[in-house]
Image (cartoon, rainbow, N blue to C red):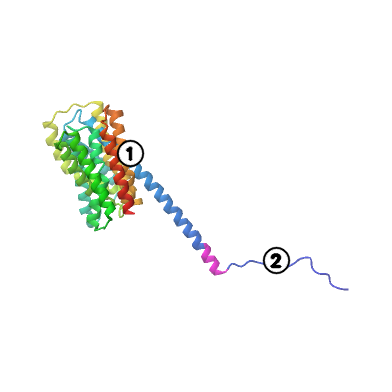
Amino acid sequence: MKLKDSAIRPTAIAVQSPASTSASTSTGTTAGTADRAADRTRSGVLLAALGVASFSLTFPATAWALEGLGPWSLVSCRMALGGLIAGICLLALRVRAPARRHWPALCAVAGGTCVGFPLLTTLALQTSTTSHAAVVVGLLPLTTAAYSSVRNRTRHSRTFWGAAVVGAAVVIAFAVQQSGGSPTGSDLYLFAALLVCAAGYAEGGQLAREMPGWQVIGWALVLCLPVAAVGAALALPAEPVHLTGHTIAGLLWLSAGSQFVGMWVWYRGMGAIGVARASQLQLAQPLLTLVWSVLLLGEHLTPAAPVAAVAVLVCIGVTQRARG
């Protein structure tokens, strides 16, 4: 009698070779790294955009605050309040002091974004409209790119520098046309503000690659506290003070919104996506400020303002593409 064939057939067992296991793990790791990079980019873009939105309200808030404070009192008080907020956050989170090599860049950030730009633009806004100032300061991404290029010895194409020169020419022509033939004192303040703020942005953007963005602006504001205290002690008795709802709202926004939270998310965004990419988002800032000047301050725009703002945006867009 023959043995019947077994109904149970041997089942093939798949054995994964070490090479295939390694390839699978590598693929999974690569995909995970790509996902994390994409998430980092998205969060960086969002943070930088929030920074731009907060900056677009800086000039209207300054105009409100100037209704009840003198320019020196306003700058001193906004620095003092911003420094106190930053100091409390740094102490509460027990953040260690920055390394010695970071202090020169922090001094540049403090001088450019915490002292120089607020003071110069506040002095300018005593006689200039916010819409006029927005168009002039719309050149900031170009001045920041130029400063960064010189500092880092970066070479750019002729297209980049050509667009930068055209953008600067548009702003100068706008300022001269609006002032009746020659730049005014407020225009000179605004042009100076562009230079010092460009240095602060570029140095802060580089520093944000080594330390959290909020600590960059936090330590810069703390550095300014002694100057702010002395300035407030001298300015408040010398200048008239008349607190209104607009004055208080403007001062609080400048201190907590524009100067601390806005710079916090801005530097963090730049640290995540780079200075060049973040500055592209700043293209919207002049136009946003023009909108706020109409809605919050009731200003009437001249036809030249939006035209000049759009022309500057086009020039900045060309420089961004030329940078690659």
Q: Residues within 10 Å of mark 2 (few under 14, many from 20)?
A: few
Residue under pointer 2: 11
Query: From where the camera sits, is residue 12 visible?
Result: yes
SS state under label 2: loop
For the residue pair 157 and 233, the one nearer the viewer reads as 157
The location of residue 95, given as percent across then percent down, is: 29, 50
Tell me if residue 182 comes above or below residue 90 in the rendering: above
Residue appearing at x 16%, y 28% in the figure: 241
Front residue (pair 315, 135): 315
- State the residue at coordinates (44%, 57%): 33
Rounded to the nearest whole Å, what is the CA distance between mark 2 and mark 1?
A: 65 Å
- How would you classify the magenta stretch by its main secondary structure? helix
Which tag, 2 or 1, sits closer to the chain's start? 2
Amino acid type shown at disc 2: Thr
Magenta part of the protein: which range? 17-24
Q: Which mark is on residue 230?
A: none
Q: Where residue 112 sits in the image (x, y, percent)?
A: 20, 46
Q: Are marks 2 and 1 in contact (CB under 8 Å)?
A: no
In the displayed structure, does residue 202 sit left or right of residue 17? left
Q: Secondary structure at mark 1?
A: helix
Q: Which residue is mark 1?
A: 53
User: Relative to 94, is 174 above or below?
Assistant: above
